[in-house]
Image: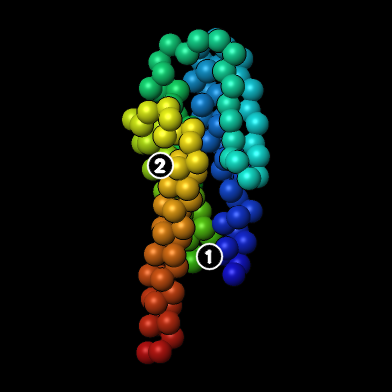
Amino acid sequence: MICLLIFFALLPVFSYLHEAGHALVCIDDGNEAEISVDIFNGGTTLCHGDVSNLFAYKISGGLLAGIVGTTIGIALFRWKIPFIAITTIGIGHLVNAGIEAFADSYFTHGVEWSFFLGLVEFVTFFILLLIFDRKTVGRGMK
């Protein structure tokens, strides 16, 4: 239960971090970026101007949030609850980076996009929860 609360509490933080990754590429091109994060729909970055490297712009958001989330999650490996929550968010954002960079715009802006990413995070979360919960139970029984 605590793990789930940490997971949902950190979602907006990592959504903002994701959008900041897009904004960094936008700003690097000399443009102005505008970030908005919504608790229900995730985040959006508006880049006021043209981006010279669209691939870098698309992949940067998920890559930044994914690397930060996965790195922090692994660093917290000793503490099961934050490890599972943060690593799940990190892996979800890494999957997001790949899809944003290589999928067409219909998929990345449709309802299917949110559903798919939610499914990836849900499955990752429960797989990590099952794996590490079993290890804890196994240690307690010996």
Residue 22: x percent and y percent?
Answer: 51, 26
- In the displayed structure, would residue 18 be above or below residue 118? above
Residue 76: x percent and y percent?
Answer: 49, 58
In the picture, measured across the screen, residue 43 lies left or right of residue 79, that is right
Displayed quadrant of residue 63: top left
- In the displayed structure, would residue 2 be above or below residue 38? below
Tag 1 near tag 2, CB within 8 Å? no
Residue beneath the point at 56% across and 43% down: 14
The amino acid type of the residue labelled 2 equals Leu
Residue highlighted by disc 1: 81
Displayed quadrant of residue 19: top right
Residue highlighted by disc 2: 94
In the picture, measured across the screen, residue 134 lies left or right of residue 33, that is left
Q: In the depicted view, which residue is nearer to us: 59 or 73?
A: 59
Dot 2 crowding, Cα within 10 Å, few <14, some 14–19, many 20+: many
Residue 140: x percent and y percent?
Answer: 44, 86
Q: In the depicted view, which residue is nearer to us: 58 or 65?
A: 58
